[in-house]
Every structure is written in C-alpha cells, then in structure tokens.
Image: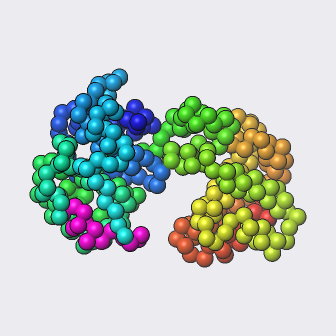
C-alpha cells in the first residue's frame, strides 16, 4: 500500500502535507501542479488516505496511514465514500454541471465515515470558466470538513480568484539518482537501461517507469539510430518514407520519442567530440558510430541539427505543419551528420 515514504523526492511538498496532518491545520483547497506522469495523483491519494486514517502512525519521522483500518482499506480500493474523484463526460472539458452535481450539490452533506470530505479534481486545467466560478462558491465558504485537491498540468488557465484561495504545491523534477535507484531496485531494470530511461525522463518518474516498461520505445530507439547511421546513403524521398514508418501521424508520443532519441544521439556526439570520453554518454553501446561521427562532423554542423530539432519540436507541440518540420530536420541531419 502506498505511503509518503514511497514518494520519490518531493521533500518540500511532503513536509508541508505532513505538517498539515500533524498539526491539524489542513487547508480547504490545494492545487498540485506538474506535468503528466510527475506523480500528482499518487501523492494526492496518499494525502487523502492519511487524512482519513483511523490510526495514523509515526514511521521514521513521518506521519503515515496505518494501512490496516477500514478507512485505509477503502481508500486503497478507491472505494472510500468520503474521498470523491470528480469525473467528466466530455473528454476535453470539465463543465459547470460536473462541478455542481459532484461537488456543490453534495458539499453540505457531512462525511459518512471520515473526518474529512475530500474532493480530488484530476485534469483541473480542463475546468471551464463557468465551472471554476461554480467551484469558487464552495471555496469562498467551505464547510470545516471539506478539502478540495485540484490536480493540473497548467496553472495559467485558472482564474486568479481560484488560485488565491488555494495552497499551490508544484511537483519538482525528481533527482536522476533517485529515479535510477527506483528503477533498478523496484523494477529490476538493468543499469544501462535505467540510465537511458533516466536521461529521457528528465526528472519525470512516471515517464521513466513508462519507458522502462515500454517495448515500443526500445523499437523506436533502435530504428531511429539505425536510420541516422544510414541517412547519408538515402535520397530525401526515402528518408521521409522511413521517418513515416517509424512514427505515425496518429501517435504524438512517437514523434516526441523519435525526436528525443535523435536529440540525445546528437548530444552524445557533441559530448564525445568535446571530451573524447565515454563515461557520460547515453548510447554507450553505439560508441563506434559516435566516435566516427564526432571525428567527421563539425561543431557548427551539429549545432545546426540541434536548432532544427528544437524548431521541429516547437512546431509539433503547437500542431503546426509537423510533417514539413520533420522534413526540414531530416535535410539538416543528412547535410551535417
């Protein structure tokens, strides 16, 4: 069963939530912000379970849920009557009716079993302005037992009247060593693959776990590196066809994975060209190719490819002519590597 000790890093957030539980000074509203996979839902669940626990315990300096009482068992099964996760029918938005029916219409009903009545709102950035205004009425005069936890990937979409009434807790990138240790000890990931996952995750523990479990990523990695190794011998139309086979228009994540693999491969070439050392390379198993390419390429040419990649990533993120961006990137790769 999950508890605070299992949260990787996030020390400042853990201390804040622990202190709130220990002193009984729990806020009526929190916003936990962070990118997808950073662990927002995980820590919100632990906080909620611990608040409702009937027999909290001090373990190694931390307040933890007992994981044995009826409340904890219900919370672990996502079946606690006083821990409510707000849902929405429309995939792209949380509407005013969602807030009214799931929060406003029930907020005055006292907790059935727990000390608190906790509402968790995943994807809070999808709340429409009308939905936020509906929620605001509860935030302005909340019953003493109510705790609202909003999870979001984007703080900028909230009305100032919402953020001013919430304690904002940002998720911080987890340390590389912490993620590596977790992958190797908890998931039995071998060291070289753990290093690769850590490099690509960039502090996002959820992404690191996903990469460690994702066979498709290994496939994209191998295809991308083989493709770059052979790019000098291909015509542009062949290059574009190969890229299309590696990534499909329907899968945005595959485009990002392709670009990430390419970016880290260029990074390795740059590092080796500057230092002639292998210790800090991500793709150490490709050292022969990296060494030969570093000898052949110029710093100017490699930086040209990096700039083309950054431009392609911006266009793909903005969903603006992604195919053209990739085509221009491939021309830069062919001419400079």
Which sits in the foreground, 205 or 74? 74
Q: Residue at the spot x=24%, y=30% of the render?
A: 55
Q: Is residue 201 magenta?
A: no
Colour mapping: rainbow
Q: Position of residue 285 (x, y in %)?
A: 77, 41
Which residue is farthest right? 233
Q: Position of residue 68 (x, y in %)?
A: 32, 31
Which sits in the foreground, 313 or 209? 209
- Quarter holding the N terminus? top left
The answer to whether residue 87 is above or below residue 320 is: above
What is the tally of numbered marks visible in this picture?
Answer: 0
Q: Residue at the spot x=74%, y=48% of the render?
A: 269
Q: Residue at the spot x=78%, y=67% of the render?
A: 242
> Quarter of the image holding residue 251?
bottom right
Task: Tell me: 115 left or right of 57.
Answer: left
Which residue is farthest top? 60
Q: Is residue 90 visible?
A: yes
Which sits in the foreground, 129 or 296? 129
Main secondary structure of the magenta stretch: helix
The answer to whether residue 294 is above or below residue 320 is: above
Task: Tell me: 112 left or right of 276.
Answer: left
Q: Is residue 99 magenta?
A: yes
Q: Is residue 13 visible?
A: no
The boundaries of the magenta stretch are 90-104
Q: Position of residue 330 (x, y in %)?
A: 74, 67
Which residue is farthest front? 70
């Amino acid at each position: 069963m999950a508890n605070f000790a299992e949260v990787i890093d996030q020390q400042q957030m853990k201390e804040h939530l622990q202190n709130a539980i220990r002193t009984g000074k729990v806020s009526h509203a929190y916003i936990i912000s962070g990118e997808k996979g950073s662990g927002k839902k995980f820590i919100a669940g632990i906080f909620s379970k611990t608040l409702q626990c009937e027999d909290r315990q001090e373990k190694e300096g931390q307040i933890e849920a007992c994981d044995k009482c009826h409340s904890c068992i219900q919370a672990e099964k996502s079946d606690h009557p006083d821990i409510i996760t707000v849902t929405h029918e429309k995939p792209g938005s949380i509407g005013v009716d969602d807030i009214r029916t799931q929060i406003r219409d029930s907020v005055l009903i006292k907790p059935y079993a727990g000390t608190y009545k906790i509402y968790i709102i995943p994807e809070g950035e999808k709340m429409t302005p009308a939905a936020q205004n509906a929620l605001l009425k509860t935030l302005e005069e909340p019953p003493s037992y109510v705790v609202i936890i909003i999870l979001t990937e984007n703080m900028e979409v909230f009305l100032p009247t919402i953020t001013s009434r919430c304690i904002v807790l940002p998720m911080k990138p987890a340390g590389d060593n912490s993620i590596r240790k977790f992958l190797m000890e908890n998931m039995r990931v071998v060291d070289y693959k753990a290093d690769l996952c850590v490099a690509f995750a960039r502090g996002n523990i959820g992404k690191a776990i996903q990469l460690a479990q994702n066979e498709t990523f290994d496939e994209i990695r191998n295809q991308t590196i083989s493709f770059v190794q052979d790019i000098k011998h291909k015509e542009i139309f062949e290059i574009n066809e190969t890229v299309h086979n590696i990534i499909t228009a329907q899968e945005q994540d595959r485009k990002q994975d392709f670009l990430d693999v390419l970016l880290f491969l260029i990074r390795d070439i740059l590092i080796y060209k500057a230092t002639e050392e292998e210790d800090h390379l991500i793709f150490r198993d490709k050292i022969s190719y990296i060494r030969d390419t570093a000898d052949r390429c110029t710093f100017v040419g490699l930086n040209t490819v990096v700039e083309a990649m950054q431009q392609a990533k911006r266009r793909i993120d903005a969903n603006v002519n992604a195919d053209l961006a990739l085509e221009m990137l491939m021309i830069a790769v062919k001419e400079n590597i």
